[in-house]
Image: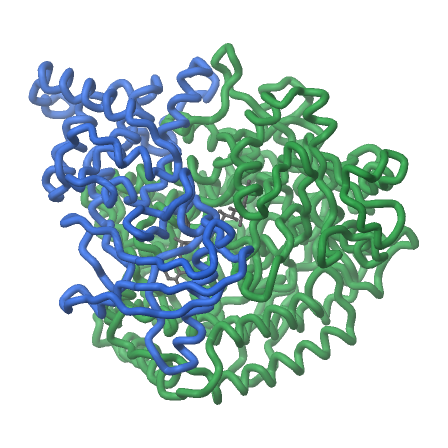
Amino acid sequence: MKLKLHVWRQKNAASAGRMVRYEAEADEHMSFLEMLDVLNESLITKGEDPVAFDHDCREGICGACGFMINGVAHGPMPGTTVCQLHMRHFKDGDELYLEPWRAAAFPVIKDLIVDRGAFDRIIAAGGYVSASTGSAQDANAILVPKKDADRAMDSAQCIGCGACVAACPNASAALFLSAKVSHLGLLPQGQPERNERAIKMVAAANHELFGGCTNIGECEAVCPKNIRLEFIARRNWDFLKASCTFREEKAAAGAG
Amino acid sequence: MKLDSRIPSGPIEQKWDNCKFEMKLVNPANKRKFTVIVVGTGLAGGSAAATMGELGYNVKCFCFQDSPRRAHSIAAQGGINAAKNYQNDGDSIYRLFYDTVKGGDFRAREANVYRLAQISVNIIDQCVAQGVPFAREYGGLLANRSFGGAQVSRTFYARGQTGQQLLLGCYQALERQVNAGRVTMFPRHEMLELIVIDGKARGIVTRNLVTGGIATHLADAVVLATGGYGNVFYLSTNAKGSNATALWRAYRKGALMANPCFTQIHPTCIPVSGDYQSKLTLMSESLRNDGRIWVPKKGRDSRPPGQISEDERDYYLERRYPSFGNLVPRDVASRAAKAVCDEGRGVGKTGLGVYLDFGDAVRRLGRKVVEERYGNLFEMYERITGDDPYSVPMRIFPAIHYTMGGLWVDYRLMSTIPGLFVLGEANFSDHGANRLGASALMQGLADGYFIIPYTIGDYLATAKLDRIDSNHQEVRRAENAVGEQIKRLLSIKGKRTVDSFHRELGRLLWEDCGMARNAKGLRHAMGKIAELQQEYWRDVNVVGDGAELNQSLEKAGRVADFLELAQLMCLDAFERNESCGGHFREEYQTPEGEALRNDDEYCYAAAWEYTGPGQAPALHKEPLSFEHVHLAQRSYK
Ligand SMILES: Cc1cc2nc3c(=O)[nH]c(=O)nc-3n(C[C@H](O)[C@H](O)[C@H](O)COP(=O)(O)OP(=O)(O)OC[C@H]3O[C@@H](n4cnc5c(N)ncnc54)[C@H](O)[C@@H]3O)c2cc1C
Ligand code: FES
């Protein structure tokens, strides 16, 4: 099949970008990224700069890939990252517009690549259980009801790709953040730090210029891992509870 | 050079304890005065960096992805082994040790493997404490499953995303240390050179992949946890960015490379569909628990699988290996698939495929149970192939998956360059000539959480390191070498793309140094690869410039190293005149077609030393002795 592509080309963070038109050829068994590989090989052969895009695992799990295809994050197939999107879902003559994630907190680095470092900083602010190596008890001493473990896993599946932010009219990171708050908050191991975690992570997200959540639901619609909106409700609950019961921490350990 | 593996004294059960006791400690207040570089944020590097941060060292950690959470470990599916014996099915530390040594076809160091089995139980405890959502039974206890090469259920898992969940646990621990100021993270940085001063590893040279800036980083010790080199074959199950550059540059600085020809071919991957294919997708080995592998009994049978009746099917693994059946180790399963395809009984358009059938499982367990166990894998299969595995058997074929070879390390995970430690898939230590399923995650975390934090302390406490600064001539020389290579690659402006060379290299290796090898083929490959390498430096076309984000340039440096590594792999395979594990030399097989080891002559780890550009590398041998698991022909019949 033949496709008309309009691709966002931007040399670096400092320069202006623009859409550039390319003709591409594809086979129905190719993945979307393989279609771009073929385009890039032809550009290089002509001595032109290939289209830069992030990718690594190409199995839908590392979260590296992602851009907008005709205004939809990761393209038209629900629950699918762009590396797992196959060309059989497109047809000859399709015209496709490829653009990077657009959000103040995700500045463009080059072409379709953006800087998602803000996500790491949100996790660093509190997205963990403080359990230093060596301090653990026997694994089976902590019982976790299967249904809680399953729900924790449902939210822990987030791959941190940023599609939720890109799809949200407010560029909110609520779904990303709530996936981590819920994963840890649903497990007994996450209870001691549950309140602080919600407060610290929300504060970090605000600091990074992500917008607020107004329950629009675009994030859930594009999430390649089907992370549910209900986790945002859980996060709101944890945040509210934490805000009402907040106490300054005492200094660690006693004197003497 | 004499290889000293520094295996501690005493009975095997006490070696690690003895070693820990003998090692010097660094006073807690002094730890922050030591800087440790960790390259890699997969399970091995991430866990090492987090734990050394917790201990108080000043850690600088590097990865080439945009976030440490995306290291290739994230893609591991099936699970992680541990000798917990929670299922009361006769497992023990000794049995895990035994299975791993035997599975590795007697080419691993016993003492290392025993320690790995011992530590396995602590890993699960640690991961659960971090909140890793492992699968649970209804009563809230941890669930297990069995995996290839084992007859007990000792594999812990989180759906089909075990690597993801383990890595996120480790990444979160790492970010906690970033927040605490003990770890400085450098994402989108690629290590391109090792700095060696007075014979000791003292730093690295990196390229910032966004700006192209070259920088030097100095330290008291360097830890490489940069993963495996399976991508030397171009098509593999590894992530696209996985590469051998860090290993190779360390090798060129004097670290020995051990058993490079020991590569693992995974039996259950989705077959190739066309020339544009960019990578191969693994279907977790756990599928072999319930799926049955078969091909038609008669050759070139093009009927759809549903029309081939039971008695016209050959369940060849169940037939040849009645006691392990579909759960034989990977090397055995892969070769058996190759054999039936070579006979013309392969399925699918290319004839390079076998069926993995869940028909019986769905009838026996019901669709719901099958869905719960394998749902996400089935979805992935359907997304890629367009076929629904609940109704049509999957088609699978072997693919390059893992590399047992890697930099040589002693018992303390230190390479032949003092102060250079190597962890995870990047080292050669624990899996011999074949790795058992669910053991790589275990090894990565054992190395990072529980071994390096101790052994590095002893090194730092005893090494007597001089102060160095960035004007030292070795530092300048290393930095210049990196700049020179980049300039050279960019100036060739030839006609062929980097990928076209990489694909050609991959094809050569797959043909002659893949599932089956022989002296003639290996000689052929060595000649061809040397020619390809010359052509590369004459005719590669790397567009753009060095002072910007340039993905062609990133690939170009990696492929330059793969071309050299590939030659060493062929040489290693050529010199090893026996078959063992994943290394199958056609000249050496039993009458039934099984691998035939030669313990009298080849019971050693082959460690290769770089002797200069264009020079033949020197072979050093570390003899292996088997005092506990007695040398025997592996049998899975
Ligand atoms: C598809 C798949 C499924 C698997 N499933 C399982 C399983 O179920 N069970 C199991 O036990 N094993 C499994 N394995 C094997 C296992 O995942 C790997 O062996 C293991 O994760 C390797 O971990 P690592 O920490 O050594 O390296 P990796 O996770 O590969 O990490 C390498 C790190 O090094 C960095 N790096 C590399 N080079 C450089 C450089 N030059 N400069 C800077 N940074 C660099 C990378 O950025 C990355 O952070 C699987 C492997 C694959 C491919
Ligand atoms: S490349 Fe890893 S999720 Fe797409």
| Quadrant of the frame with the N terminus of chain B | bottom right
Residue at the location (18% across, 38% down)? A172
User: In front here: A196 or B53?
Assistant: A196
User: In front here: A67 or B480?
Assistant: A67
Residue B492 visible in image: yes
Of all residues, the one furthest to the left in this rendering is A248
Chain B pictured colour: green
Q: Is residue B92 above or below residue B422?
A: above
Residue A55 location (% of width, % of height): 39, 56
* Chain letter of the blue region: A
User: In front here: B80 or B374?
Assistant: B374
Residue A4 location (% of width, % of height): 37, 64
Residue B448 location (% of width, % of height): 42, 44
- Name the quadrant containing residue B308: top right
User: In front here: A189 or B624?
Assistant: A189
Q: Is residue B465 above or below residue A101?
A: below
Residue B490 location (% of width, % of height): 36, 83
Residue at the location (36% across, 47% down)? A74
